[in-house]
Amino acid sequence: MIRHAGADGYIDAKKEAFWSELNAIYSNGNNLDSRLYELNDNGVINYEEIGEDGFAPIVIAGIKDQTHAHLSALISTIEAETIELEKHIKEILTFDPEQMTAEIEKAQRQLVEAKTAATANEMLKPILKPIGEIERHFASVVEVSKSYDNVYKNIIRPVQREGQEGVRATVRWAIISIVLSTMFSVAISNWSKLSELLASPNNTLQPTTPASGGHGG
């Protein structure tokens, strides 16, 4: 509408090019009318149809200062979303799968230590059940890790080699987004439960392991 507006802000509604561009956005005429009236009601543009049923209406359309402000706000929103998306892509491309593997192996060792300590101490045996639950959740985290490693080798690493600029407009981003969003959602949901236990072996379990000949009655 800004492009088709004259110096006075009004638009020649008889221009075919004007309606052709709008129809390319809203192919359904009812949806187009609703959107134009919505923008009018919100004070973004001027739009009105005057006429009687059965006759082609007289259309009064135009822009105003709020139109430019609205466009500027939309552009700012898109810019912010683009920056956030680029940041997210950079995090994916620079993610270190070896570090993730090391952290998983460390967590596995801590789980084994916790289970061993709980098994050897009567006072700690009640926590064997929650430890078992954590182990089940952790198993799915491990599976996610294995799947991610395949994704990294077969999708992300090749993208890194080709360079970010050359592949941003390709379908690979869609593949990465779909696969990783699914994997990370599973990992995060399970990891939150796992992390609650990771500190316990160091903070509470090790000091309480009884020596041989333990406490008498």
Image: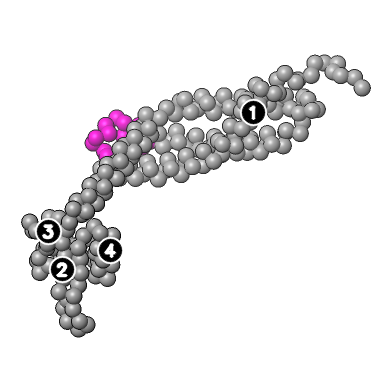
Amino acid under label 2? Answer: Ile
Residue in front for this viewpoint, 57 or 166: 57
Q: Residue at the spot x=42%, y=40% of the render?
A: 180
**Residue 127 makes an appearance in the image:** yes
CB atoms at circles 2 and 3 under 8 Å apart? no
**Looking at the rendered structure, which numbered label has been put on residue 41?**
4
**Residue 35 makes an appearance in the image:** no
User: Which quarter of the rendered picture does the C terminus lie within?
Assistant: top right
| Residue at disc 1, secondary structure | helix
Q: Which of marks 2 and 4 is nearer the N terminus?
A: 4
Where residue 156 sits: x, y (%)?
Answer: 36, 35
Q: Residue at the spot x=20%, y=81% of the render?
A: 52
Few, some or many residues within 10 Å of mark 2 (<14, 14–19, 20+): some
Question: Magenta segment, which residues?
Answer: 154-168
Amino acid under label 1? Answer: Leu
Q: Which of marks 2 and 3 is nearer the N terminus?
A: 3
**Residue position marked by numbered label 2 in the rendering:** 60
Q: Which of marks 4 and 1 is nearer the N terminus?
A: 4
